[in-house]
Amino acid sequence: MDRINRRTFLEGLGLVGAAALLSGCSTDSKSPAISDGAIGDLRKKLTGRVLTPGDPDYRTTGLPANTRFASTRPAVIAECRSEADVATAVRWALDNGVKPVPRGGGHSYAGMSATEGLLLDLSALNAVEAGASGLAVTGGAAKNSDVFNTLRDGRMALPGGTCLGVGVGGLVLGGGLGFYSRWAGLTADHLRSTRMVTATGEVIEVNASSHPDLFWACRGATGGQFGVHTQFTFELVETPSSVTYFRFEWRGADNATAVLANFDKIMASAPPALNGLVYAEATPVGTDGPRAAIDVVMRGQYMGPRAELEDLVRPVLTAAPATRRPQCRSCRTGRQRRSSSNRPPNCMRGTTSAASQKPLFPTTFGPNR
Ligand SMILES: Cc1cc2nc3c(=O)[nH]c(=O)nc-3n(C[C@H](O)[C@H](O)[C@H](O)COP(=O)(O)OP(=O)(O)OC[C@H]3O[C@@H](n4cnc5c(N)ncnc54)[C@H](O)[C@@H]3O)c2cc1C
């Protein structure tokens, strides 16, 4: 029999996978009428708060990052403060025929964590611990920013995404692409184990030897299909002593053409240490007309020193000398990008570029670290 890859299998699985967590629960995202008695019962059992539309904090709690889905409001929000809370809420959902939908970082582009049923707000499960073992253990709703903050000396890194506000849960379950991917693979490639609450409220450890099929399926299945993940254990990667972050900017349609074409060429043969992207976006049209009203950005991360990066990207810089701002405005060398603490953990604008615009540790870490 031909071997199929995980993504193909999951695509084929489609609705079957989607229904797995919800077996026994309503598959209709609209909630059935939920009695006051049932809500009272959940309040008694949960250590976190249970919010319904009449509660003062309901309106502002549990809103997704993508405001397109802000009007899809849950019948009930269960703030899960622990794994036991998650299991309790899932069992309650099963007993009451309400669809439970977990939300981690709330950054689903497709609104997959918006529901009119029971919203499992996992945001309190955001702890991150990393020790000498080279492993990091995160809560089911830790964000990229929580991981960056824990690993801020930069010696070890989790190949993760670029937006500080994205949840590690949604990220790893969907694969997880970022500025380490060509060099170290996807976030899912670094998952070693996860704790899950199943559709029946049972807690299981899932890894290569315990429920291996489920472990395989989780790494790419997006989120919530097979259970609610309360914890992830990742194997970290050691970073080289120099890592260079870059951001170059241009203006105008001609530069956009030159940058995009040449970036494409260099990436076809670039070493895995070079990770980056380019984009062009329209800005308000001024007196120079529409062809000038285009911002062009090339940004990313090179797992090595700045001089090597500059050699690699020279064809782009030669084809389109940066005109708007000095070249390599944010070229910095340091072990780890600094995460911003004063920025709201929401970069719905799409990118995340803000993360690499931030100043970086000014030090080049030496061999003694
Ligand atoms: C601004 C922005 C930048 C992004 N940048 C990147 C990037 O650099 N790289 C990349 O790979 N992706 C990126 N993404 C995509 C992002 O990884 C996915 O949208 C991801 O699913 C979001 O996860 P979340 O936990 O923040 O979102 P949520 O909306 O909370 O969850 C997304 C899905 O995962 C489920 N889920 C979340 N946590 C759990 C859990 N603990 N247990 C079970 N199910 C769970 C939810 O039910 C939902 O189905 C970006 C998205 C945005 C909006």
Image (spheres, grey):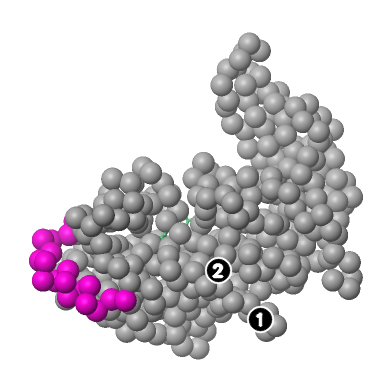
Which residue: 67% across, 69% down? 151
Residue 79 appears in the rendering: yes
Which comes sooner in the sequence, label 1 or label 2? 1
Q: Nearer the viewer, mark 1 or mark 2?
A: 1
Residue at horizontal 89%, vertical 66%? 366
Q: Secondary structure at mark 2?
A: helix
- Percent of width and height locating residue 261: 71, 35
User: Which mark, by number, is residue 188?
Assistant: 2
Q: CA distance from mark 1 to mark 2?
A: 20 Å
SS label for mark 1: loop
Identify which amino acid the numbered label 2 is placed on: Ala
**Disc 1 target residue:** 131
Q: Which mark is residue 253?
A: none
Instruction: Name the residue nearer the viewer: 256 or 4.
Output: 256
Asked if the beta carbon under badge 1 is closer than 8 A to the nearest atom of ligand 1, the reply is no
Asked if marks 1 and 2 touch (Cβ < 8 Å), the reply is: no
Q: Quadrant of the N terminus?
A: bottom left
Give the image location of residue 285, x and y in percent: 58, 17
Q: Quadrant of residue 237?
A: bottom right
Residue at (77%, 31%) from the top-left corner? 325
Compared with 313, 19 (above or below) is: below
Residue 169 lies, in percent from the top left, at 47, 66
Q: Position of residue 112 (x, y in %)?
A: 36, 56
Looking at the rendering, the stretch of residues picked out in magenta corresponds to 29-47
Tell me which amino acid carries mark 1: Gly
Asked whether residue 328 is drawn in magenta, I would say no
